[in-house]
Image: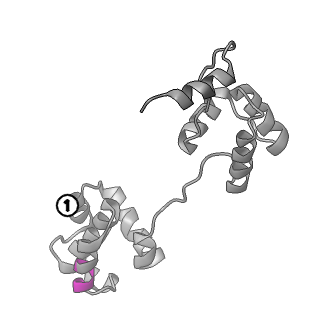
Amino acid sequence: MDYGTVITEELSFLQEQERHAGKAIVRDRIRFLRVLKSGECKSQRAAGQAIGLQERQSQRLLQFYRQQGYAGLTSPGYLHSFGKLSGSQISQLQAYLRQDLARTLSEVRLYIAAEFGVDYTVSGLCKLFQRLKIKLKTGRPVNIRRDEGQVVAFKKTLRR
């Protein structure tokens, strides 16, 4: 197969894009095309081995290039999500947590099930909170016999 005609991008363009690729997977995919276009490797198998792919993976990569083109090959292959809840549901959950109405993960679990109709386990909620960087906020302990008047007087007479 003549890969020089199958791959429509210019060799100089592929070299430039390979140098400026931000992600390693995109860089390797561009390198795969460049190696085939330039004739450094005569087969898909050899070009795939040059970037660490098996034969079937390199066949799929060229097939994907033929279907999607250069833009499809270099675009990210997935959209990031935070699980079962949508973005608006997550913002509603964060507003609910700011109101300090729930004390435990079990209470939050019940709220999510009632409000959004989504079932989470307690460990699943724990992992969701870790991904969202939601942490338990508690106040410092205060002595129940503390007199506020004496605290204010102490602060006024404190030497700094």
* Residue 48 x/y as whole percent: 26, 61
Tell me if residue 135 comes above or below residue 8 in the rendering.
above
* Residue 74 x/y as whole percent: 40, 71
- If the image is split into quadrants, where does the C terminus sit? top left
Please name whichever residue, 95 or 54, is drawn nearer the observer in this view of the structure.
Answer: 95
Residue at image point 83% right, 43% down: 115
Whether residue 2 appears in this view of the structure is no
Residue 144: image quadrant is top right
Kindly identify the amino acid type of the residue bearing the numbered disc 1.
Ala
Main secondary-structure element of the magenta-colored stretch? helix
Relative placement, left or right, of 42 versus 68 is left
Please name whichever residue, 101 or 156, is drawn nearer the observer in this view of the structure.
Answer: 156
Residue 154: image quadrant is top right
Residue 14: image quadrant is bottom left
Please name whichever residue, 125 or 42, is drawn nearer the observer in this view of the structure.
Answer: 125
* Residue 81 x/y as whole percent: 59, 52
Residue linked to disc 1: 50
View extreme (right): residue: 114
Residue 128 is covered by the magenta coloring:
no
Q: For the residue carrying disc 1, how many other residues have a C-alpha within 10 Å: few (<14), some (14-19), or many (20+)?
A: some
Residue at image point 23% right, 65% down: 47
Please name whichever residue, 57 or 127, is drawn nearer the observer in this view of the structure.
Answer: 127
* Residue 53 x/y as whole percent: 28, 55
Tell me if residue 22 comes above or below residue 56 in the rendering.
below
Q: Which residues are drawn in magenta?
A: 11-15
Tell me if residue 128 comes above or below residue 142 in the rendering.
below
Colour scheme shown? one colour
Whether residue 50 appears in this view of the structure is yes
Residue at image point 84% right, 38% down: 114
